[in-house]
Image (cartoon, grey):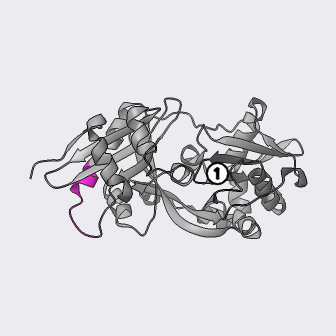
Amino acid sequence: MSAPDTRAITLVDIPLLRRLTGSSVILDSETGLTRDARGAASALLSGIVFPRGLYTLVSRSETQQVIGQFRYRPEDVNAHMVYLAPGLADEGDDSVWLHILDAMAREAGRHGAHALVAEVEPDTRLFEIMRQARFATYARQTIWRHEPLTLDAASLPLPLRPETSNDQIGIMSLICSTIPAMLQQVAAPQGDMQGFVYRKGGQVEAYIAISEGDQGVYLLPFIHPDVLPEAAEIVAAAIARCEHNPRVPIYACIRSYQPWLETAMQRLGFAPWIDQAIMVRHITAGVRGRAYQPLKATGTLERVKNAMPQAWSAIILPEEERELT
C-alpha cells in the first residue's frame, strides 16, 4: 500500500468537508464550545475561504480520507489543533491519522511554531494515536458547565474591570506565580481572548480570559490562592460582563494545577462536564522567550510549590521529563 498523500486543502475539497463535518473531533475547547465548529460557516470552511491564521490539510490513502486543521499566528509561540475529521473508530487502520498528525506538525513548524498543542479526551483511541505520534501529556483539565445564567454586574461589588496595557506586568506576574514554568507557554490564554482583571492591594490577584460566541461562553480563570475566598465572586463578576451568558451555556476550564478553583465552581452551580489532556508535540529545538516573563512577580513558583504541595503533585509531567526526574 502506497503512503498517504497529504496537501493543503482547496475549494474543490468543500464537498469532502461537508461530508466529514458531522464526525469531526474538536481539539480546541475555546473554538468548539463558543462557535459551531461543525456548521456551514465554521472554522472547517473559514480556514479555506478566509484563512485568518487557520491552516487546513487533507490526507488520502486508497481507502481513507482525513482532514485536519490548526491555528497559528506569527506572534504566538505554539500552534493549536482545531479539529480532525472524521474521528477514529475503535478499530481499524490508523496510518492516515498518524500521517496527517506528522504533516500538521511539519506545517506548523514551517510557519514558525515551536510546538503543536491539542486538548484530547484521555479515554479515546485518538489519545493513544497521538501518543504514538509523539505528543506528550503536559497537564489535565476539566471543562465545567453551567446552563445560561443571568447576573447583574451592578449588584456585584467586586471591582473587576477590562484589562489595559497597564495591567500587563501584573498579569505576567500572576501567571508566572500560579502556573508551573514548563507549562506557561502552553497554558497562557490566547491573545484574542477578552480579559478582566481583579486587583487587591495594588496587585493583580485574578485574571479571567473570556471568549464568547453563538454556542457558548468560555472562561479561562487565573486566580491566586491568596484570594481564594473571593474566587466565586470574581468568576461571577466576569460572567456578568458577558453579553451571551443569558442565552448560551457557560464553560470554565479548570486545570490540574488549579484544584483550589473547584470549590468556587461548585458554589456557582457549575458541574464537571468533560475531562481532557493537554497534549503537546515539540517541533523545533529552538527556544523562544515565554509568552509571560516573570517581571516583578508577586510570587514565585517555589512559593506555590511549598504552599500547595497537592496542586504541585497533580501536574502531569511529559514522559521525557519524568524520565529525567
Residue farthest toward the left in the current orientation of the protein: 1
Image coordinates of residue 211 in percent, x first then y, are: 63, 46
Name the amino acid, label 1: Ile
The spot of residue 133 in percent (x, y) is 32, 53
Identify the image quadrant of residue 267: bottom right
Q: Is residue 234 visible?
A: yes
- 51, 125: nearer the viewer: 51
Q: Is residue 166 above or below residue 23?
A: above
Left or right: 281 as drawn, with respect to 257: left
**Residue 324 drawn at (x, y percent):** 45, 56
Queried whether the magenta region covers residue 187, the answer comes back as no
Q: Residues within 10 Å of mark 1 (few under 14, many from 20)?
A: many
Disc 1, SS: loop
Image check: 212 left or right of 171? left
Q: Could you say which quadrant of the image residue 104 lies in?
A: top left
**Residue range (magenta):** 91-99
> What residue is shown at x 39% (from left), y 53% (from top)?
135
Q: What residue is shown with label 1? A: 179
On the image, the x and y values in percent for residue 49 come to 40, 33
Q: Nearer the viewer, residue 310 or 122?
A: 122
At 82% from the left and 57% from the top, the residue drawn is: 227
Residue at the (44%, 47%) spot, across then down: 82
Residue 23 is left or right of residue 121, and the answer is: left
Q: Give the answer, above or below, for where 208 lies relative to 294.
A: below
Residue 296 visible: no
